[in-house]
Amino acid sequence: MGSVEMVLVMLLAVIASGYVVRMLPFPVPLPLVQIALGALMEGVFQHGVELQPDLFFLLFLPPLLFLDGWRIPKVGLLRDKGTIIELAFGLVVFTVVGAGYLIHWLVPWMPLPVAFALAAIVAPTDPIAVSSIASKVPIPGRLMHILEGEALLNDASGLVCFRFAVAAAVTGHFSLATATGTFIWVVLAGLASGVAITMAIAAAQRYLSRQFGEENGTSIVINLLMPFGAYLVAEHLGASGILAAVAAGVTMSYVELSGRAPATIRVRRAVVWDTVQFTLNGVMFVLLGEQFPDIISGALRTAEASGERGLLRLLVLALTVSLALTLLRFIWVWVSLRLTLLTARLQGQAVYKPNLRLVLATSLAGVRGAITMAGILTLPLALPGRHLAVFLAVAVILVSLLLATIALPPILRSLTLPEETPDTAQEDFARHEAALAAIAAVERVNRDELDVDPDIQSSAADRVAGIYRHRLGTRDGSMDPARVRMADEAERTFRLAALDAERETILSLARQERLSDASARELVREIDLIEARYR
C-alpha cells in the first residue's frame, strides 16, 4: 500500500473512531479507540508507517499548540500563573530526577542519562486526551484552565531536559551552567519569536489588504500558515518552536481583539480550525497505535538480549513506572498546594481548605500524549536500551489514559473548587453596553439622509433599534434574573423551530424544482448563519 493510500486509511480510521466510541456500551476515551484502530491497521495491512519525529513535530504540533494558545482563557491563565508555572517547570524537573533514578534502579543495565531522557519525555502532559476522558463528567473550569496552561508550557521544559539528557548519553558530558543558559535562551527566544512573527504577519496582511484588497480565503490560509512560520523561525534560532507556536496563538487572540476581520471570515475560520484540530489529533493517536506492534517486538528483543525474558516482566515494569509517575505528580501537587495556601494565609487572603480529591484528580489528569510519542522516537538508534525506553514511553501513555478513564469520573463527580467570578455577569454587562452602542449607531445613521423614502428610513431605524431596546428592557434589572434566563431559553426554542421550518420549506421547493439549487444554497446559508447564534 502506497503512502497516499495509508494517509486515506488513517483519515478513515479517525472518522470511524468517532462512531465506534459512541457505539460502545461503556465510556471509552476517543484517543484509546484511535490507538486501537491504528494497531488494527498495522495488523491488517502489515505496512508500517516510518514515523520521522522531526517531520511529525513540524506537521502536527504547531497548528494544535497555536490553536490551544489562541483559545485558552487568558484571565484564568493569568490568575493561576503561579500554580501553572510550578507544574510546568518545577514538576518537570522533579519528575526527571525522581523518575530517572527510579528507572535506572529498576533497569540497572540502562544508562542513567538514557533513564533521565525517558523521564524527561514522559513529563509533558496532553490536555486534549484529558478533555476527551472528562467529556462524560466535565472537569471543573478552573482546574481545566490550570491543566491546559500547564500542558502549553511543560512541553518546552520537558523537551529541553530531554535534549540535554540525550546529549549527556551520547557525549558523556553534562554542564549545569550550559544547560541553564540554553534553557533561558530556548524559552525567551521562543516566546519572542512567536510574538514577533504574529505581529509582523498581521501588520503585513492589514497593509496589503488595505492597499490592494484580497481574495476570499486568503486570510484563513495566512492564519493556518502562521504557526508554522513561528515554529520554523524559532527552531532556526535554536529556540523552542513549541513555545513559539503557543506564543503566536496567544498573540493572535489579542490581534483578534482589533475586530478587523469580517464576520464571514471569522465564522469560516472557526469551522476550518475545528476541522484541522479534530483531524490532526485523531491522526496522531492512530499513528501511535500503528507504531505499537513494532515497539513491543523491539522491546522484547532488547529485554531478551539483556537476559530479562518475558512480556509479563515488561508489563510489570511499565505499570511500575506509570504508577511512580502518578505518585511523583501527587506529591508535587500536594506540597505545591500547601505552600500556595500558606503564602496566601500569610498575606491575609481567604484560604481554600485543600481537598484530597482535588489533588488526586490533578494527579490523574496528567495524561501523556503526542509529545511523549514523537520525542522518544528521536532517541539515537545506537543508544543502549533505546527500544525498551520507547516501549516504556508508549506504555506510560496507555496506562495514564486507562487510569484517568477509570478513576477520573468518580473523583470529579461533585468535586467543588474555590468560587470563580461567574462569566454570566460579565456577559450581561457586555451585551448591555453593546446594545447601547448599537442604538447610538442606528440613531447616528438615521440622522443622515439615505437614498430611500424618509418614512421607510424612519421605520427601518425604529425596527432595528427596537430589537436592542427589547434586549435592554429584559436586562435592566427590572426582571428577575431567573425569569430572564427562562425567557431567553423560550425565545431560543421558538427561533430554532422557526428556522428549521424555513430551511425545510426551502429545501422542499428545491427538490420540487420550484427553486434553483444555487438560490436554495444561498438561502439555506443565511438561515444557517442565523441559527449558529442560537446553537
Image (cartoon, rainbow, N blue to C red):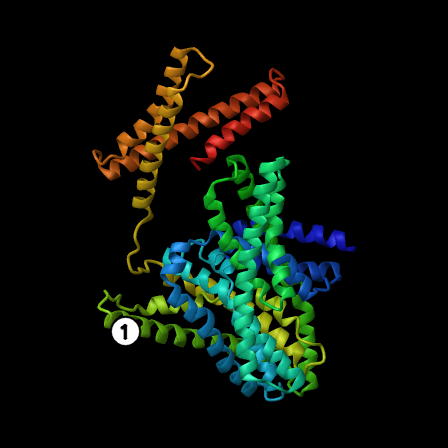
User: How far from the left and from the top, in percent, is residue 316?
Assistant: 55, 79
Q: Which residue is more in the foreground, 463 or 27?
A: 463
Q: Secondary structure at mark 1?
A: helix
Q: Is residue 275 something that shows in the picture? A: no
Which quadrant, please, contains the C terminus? Answer: top left
User: How far from the left and from the top, in percent, is residue 361?
Assistant: 39, 66
Q: Residue at x 39, y 18 (%)?
A: 460
Q: Considering only vertical position in the picture, is 374 above or below 305?
A: above
Q: Residue at x 43, y 25 (%)?
A: 498
Q: Considering only vertical position in the picture, is 471 above or below 358?
A: above
- Residue projecting furthest to the right: 2
In this picture, residue 429 sits left or right of residue 212: left
Q: Residue at x 59, y 26 (%)?
A: 521
Q: How many marks?
A: 1
User: How far from the left and from the top, in percent, is residue 55?
Assistant: 68, 62
Q: State the image quarter where residue 397 is shown.
A: bottom right
Q: State the image quarter where residue 462 is shown.
A: top left
Q: Which residue is more in the foreground, 53 or 416?
A: 53
Q: Considering only vertical position in the picture, is 424 above or below 336?
A: above
In this picture, residue 484 sits left or right of residue 268: left
CA neighbours of label 1 inside 10 A, class few (<14), some (14 to 19), many (20+): some
Q: Considering only vertical position in the picture, is 60 above or below 309?
A: above
Q: Is residue 373 something that shows in the picture? A: yes
Which quadrant, please, contains the N terminus? Answer: bottom right
User: How far from the left and from the top, in percent, is residue 209?
Assistant: 59, 38
The residue carrying mark 1 is 342
Q: Residue at x 55, y 58 (%)?
A: 194
Q: State the image quarter where residue 242 is shown.
A: bottom right
Q: Which residue is more in the foreground, 432 or 267?
A: 432
Q: Amino acid at mark 1?
A: Leu
